[in-house]
Amino acid sequence: MAGNYKNANSFALKYAFYISLTATAVLSIVFFFAALSAYWVLAVFFILLFAIAFLSLRAGVENYVLRLIKNVYKEVSLLEGIRFTGNSVNTDLESLTADIEKFARGKKIEIESLKVQEEYRKDFLGNVAHEMKTPLFTIQGYILTLLDGAMDDKKIRKKYLERTNKAVDRLLYIVKDLDTITRLESGMQQVVKQPMDVIELIQSVFEMLEMKAEKKNIALIFDRPYPHPIEVMADYEKIEHVLVNLIENSIKYGHQNGTTEVSVEDLVKDKVIVRVTDNGDGISREHLPRLFERFYRVDKSGSRKEGGSGLGLSIVKHIVEAHGERIYVESEPDVGSEFSFTLQKIEKTESKSTSELKTANPA
Ligand code: ADP
């Protein structure tokens, strides 16, 4: 066994010495009274006894300690299926202490992270339940009122059914966003980066949200003309999701007759930054650090005039970070907000080959 018996050795040495010394002292007294003067016998006796005592003590201690330590290792390994340092169980208490400390540190970190996860899980479930409760109670309220007789009045019936439908829409938002966030977090939805023209994407999102913007007479514009494509490496559908969320928010929290302006600028050599700027409600400084958290809302009152699931920005952040990019926010109440995120730009030579590729394969 390749064990390190440093401590067993010193223990055996010390006690073998005491035993041999005591026995030799007793024998010396006997010799003294017996008037014997064979001192060499005493010396041989001391050496022999010391050797025997040392060997027996060491073997005993090793067996005893080893048995105890083996049990400790077995218990802990059984718990965890872990392996300690080295291949053999050893009786060196320093190494054993180091092993156990290492194990305890690992366990502490694991316990901390489990606690955080548990907190998060509780919060998440609590939030989900809370978010679902409001529309469900609304739906229940309208249905009960209709059943109580309101359905006989054609006008009220239509009004209540429309409101019920709106609450169902809200439930659908929540469930859809929950599904998206779960997929993103579990890694089920992988980011597939491909060359794409970000200007064309922004244009198509403008068209998609045109009607919503018109309702508040909000202009969706670029900060300047973009006559040429700007090629980036990104997941088209996911970045579309990001832009839809940010531009939709700029409309939701934008003022009547306002403007949402989008710009794309070079940031560093291989990065562009896309900015979505509005001149709407704005957000006060204290909310900014928590804005991207799940379910975080600035206006927590039930009387919110606007609002989706409260998961929108959290999904946006997930997507941007899954691309290995960053998202930023700057905002001032009643002045407006600017949400910006970076994207990986394709170098000129690559960009050429992409457009060539597109022409060759228009699909
Ligand atoms: P919601 O579904 O409530 O819109 P989001 O995660 O998209 O949730 O946004 C979180 C909160 O951030 C919103 O409730 C809103 O208060 C605030 N917010 C987001 N975008 C803007 C914006 N462009 N202007 C002002 N406030 C915004």
Image: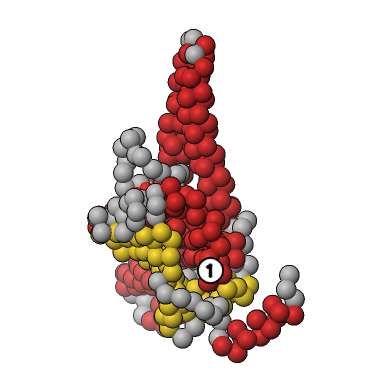
Q: Which residue is mark 1?
A: 323
Q: Nearer the viewer, residue 50 or 324?
A: 324
The correct choice, above or below, for 151 with respect to 330 in the image is: above
Q: Nearer the viewer, residue 71 or 193?
A: 193
Q: Position of residue 274 (x, y in %)?
A: 44, 70
Q: Kindly state the secondary structure of the residue where label 1 is placed.
A: loop
Q: Quadrant of residue 24?
A: bottom left
Residue appearing at x 34%, y 56% in the figure: 258
Quadrant where the C terminus lies? bottom right
With 129 as the anchor, is 184 left or right in this view?
right
Q: Is residue 184 visible?
A: yes
Q: Position of residue 39 (x, y in %)?
A: 38, 81
With 340 as the anchor, is 321 left or right in this view?
right
Residue appearing at x 49%, y 9% in the figure: 149
The correct choice, above or below, for 189 with respect to 50 in the image is: above
The correct choice, above or below, for 2 with respect to 316 in the image is: below
Identify the amino acid type marked 1.
His
Q: Is residue 326 visible?
A: no
Type of colouring? secondary structure
Q: Position of residue 298 (x, y in %)?
A: 31, 47
Q: Position of residue 194 (x, y in %)?
A: 63, 72
Q: Quadrant of residue 235?
A: bottom right
